[in-house]
Image: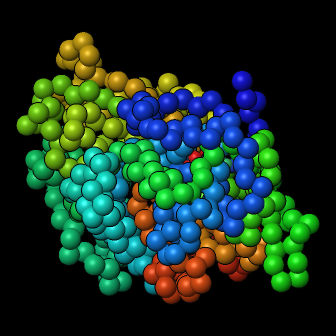
């Protein structure tokens, strides 16, 4: 049995619903016993959606596929990308207040606009390429379950609109109307805007398959344990030696797509990217929520900014995916403390009970006593998200390490960010400017940003 290495993904994680339903993926364990190549011009570390899409975009940009190697610590795409709650859910305005404080009005507007762009890009991409990832373009509700959160959201909306943010696609429902549209009897108010859901593992696997077909070499179950300057570096060209249990690969371009685990190989980021456990659950619905009664929209059931649950009902099988952060303030401090363990091999029972209880309260037809045998909780799993000190990802060139790049730190929100961030880092690697990426400037990993964070500017939106 492989021994865990502190700071790296645990070698024997639990299996998510998405992984359970894709065990036949042919590249799941590809090259698991093969030595890594001694040289590769480009090495992408991590095979989640970030690593898979960066690779895809590099090839689209003209890099020969045979020049790229992806090295993955576990099964292909076995990190957060195959463990999330399936939501491609842009923030439409809620985070504006916090982003504004952290990054200023202009950047806060760009952060929100970027998420809408991501939804459109995912939608266009899966349609254009016929990606079979159960993508469901729909709308989503922010369901305000407390007056405190209704007031917070109203203030965010007001500030966002006043700053010039586009609210033309957002609908607001109050009181009885909010219950009617969301079917949540406890709703005080609700906001609705376009969003989507997908089978995230199928999306990541599709991307990896395209690259492998073209000649990319993917090595699974092969953690990169260090990246050190190669002795063969010259004054004009730096090479990096990537050590793994199956050999050393020398590369001139290294792209860290390791999300929560980025600090292991980039220790200077350890104060700025923190791994957090998150949990999701699959629920088989009873008759009031199946067949023609399926929930047409996804939702976030929100008590406070940090106490919330996501709900997305899948079209192909009606299974409801319930997401829950382990940082949830209503669970015991002992259970909450487990969120800091970067270990996705076990679930938190208290979080599971709480997520189901909250769902039953919002949808009383799902109370345990009313369910048939076979309905109700099907599965629960955990995954590790990478929280950053300023709530936005790190994208771009790591100036202190020439030839190394990063696309990581998605704050449990990568499905709404990676489809612009990964193409963005690929553009930069291919010689583009930051402006070419179209990303908010605050996503860039600059020395100034790291210095500012070092001084302690932190707040979480999630
Ligand atoms: C329970 C849960 C629910 C979530 N729900 C949502 C949601 O509904 N919507 C949303 O937008 N986001 C959600 N997220 C977050 C989302 O899944 C992530 O933001 C996204 O998947 C990050 O993708 P990634 O490719 O950057 O990282 P990952 O998918 O984590 O990929 C990183 C990969 O790097 C590998 N790796 C790490 N270190 C090394 C190393 N040294 N050597 C080799 N390989 C290494 C890992 O094994 C992993 O496969 C959720 C996450 C969880 C866990």
Relative to 324, does residue 226 appear above or below in the rendering? below
Q: How many marks?
A: 0
- Residue at 56% x, 57% y is 216
- Residue at 26% x, 27% y is 284
- Residue at 45% x, 51% y is 209
The outermost residue toward the right is: 231
134 to the left or right of 118: left
Place residue 25 in its image quadrant: top left
Q: Where is residue 188 in the image (x, y as percent from the top left)?
A: 22, 50
Relative to 229, does residue 249 appear above or below in the rendering? above
377 to the left or right of 219: left
Q: Position of residue 285 (x, y in %)?
A: 22, 28
Q: Position of residue 265 (x, y in %)?
A: 76, 56
Q: Position of residue 11 (x, y in %)?
A: 66, 33
Q: Quadrant of the N terminus?
A: top right
Res. 70 visible in picture:
yes
- Residue at 21% x, 34% y is 318
Relative to 147, does residue 8 appear above or below in the rendering? above
């Amino acid at each position: 049995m492989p021994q865990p290495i502190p700071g790296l993904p645990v070698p024997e994680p639990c299996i998510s619903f998405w992984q359970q339903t894709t065990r036949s993926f042919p590249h799941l364990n590809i090259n698991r016993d093969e030595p890594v190549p001694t040289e590769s011009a480009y090495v992408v570390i991590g095979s989640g959606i970030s690593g898979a899409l960066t690779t895809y975009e590099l090839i689209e940009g003209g890099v020969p596929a045979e020049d790229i190697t992806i090295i993955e610590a576990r099964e292909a795409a076995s990190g957060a990308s195959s463990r999330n709650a399936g939501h491609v859910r842009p923030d439409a305005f809620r985070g504006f207040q916090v982003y504004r404080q952290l990054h200023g009005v202009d950047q806060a507007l760009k952060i929100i606009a970027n998420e809408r762009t991501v939804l459109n890009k995912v939608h266009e991409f899966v349609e254009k390429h016929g990606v079979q990832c159960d993508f469901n373009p729909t709308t989503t509700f922010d369901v305000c379950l407390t007056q405190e959160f209704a007031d917070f959201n109203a203030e965010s909306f007001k500030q966002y609109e006043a700053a010039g943010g586009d609210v033309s696609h957002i609908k607001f429902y109050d009181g009885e109307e909010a219950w009617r549209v969301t079917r949540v009897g406890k709703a005080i108010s609700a906001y609705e805007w376009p969003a989507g859901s997908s089978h995230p593992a199928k999306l990541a696997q599709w991307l990896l398959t395209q690259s492998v077909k073209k000649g990319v070499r993917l090595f699974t179950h092969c953690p990169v344990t260090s990246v050190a300057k190669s002795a063969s570096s010259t004054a004009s060209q730096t090479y990096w030696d990537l050590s793994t249990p199956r050999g050393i690969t020398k590369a001139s371009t290294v792209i860290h797509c390791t999300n929560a685990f980025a600090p292991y190989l980039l220790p200077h980021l350890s104060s700025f990217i923190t791994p957090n456990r998150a949990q999701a659950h699959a629920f088989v619905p009873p008759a009031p929520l199946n067949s023609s009664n399926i929930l047409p929209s996804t939702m976030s059931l929100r008590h406070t900014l940090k106490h919330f649950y996501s709900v997305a009902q899948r079209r192909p099988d009606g299974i409801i995916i319930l997401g829950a952060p382990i940082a949830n303030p209503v669970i015991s401090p002992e259970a909450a403390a487990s969120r800091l363990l970067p270990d996705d091999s076990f679930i938190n029972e208290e979080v599971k009970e709480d997520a189901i209880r909250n769902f039953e309260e919002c949808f009383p037809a799902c109370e345990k006593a009313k369910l048939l045998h076979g309905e109700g909780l099907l599965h629960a799993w955990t995954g590790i998200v990478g929280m950053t000190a300023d709530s936005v990802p790190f994208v771009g060139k790591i100036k202190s390490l020439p030839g190394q790049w990063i696309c990581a730190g998605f704050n449990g929100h990568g499905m709404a960010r990676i489809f612009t961030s990964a193409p963005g880092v690929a553009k930069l690697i291919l010689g583009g400017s930051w402006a070419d990426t179209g990303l908010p400037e605050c996503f860039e990993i600059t020395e100034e940003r790291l210095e500012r964070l070092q001084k302690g500017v932190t707040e979480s939106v999630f």
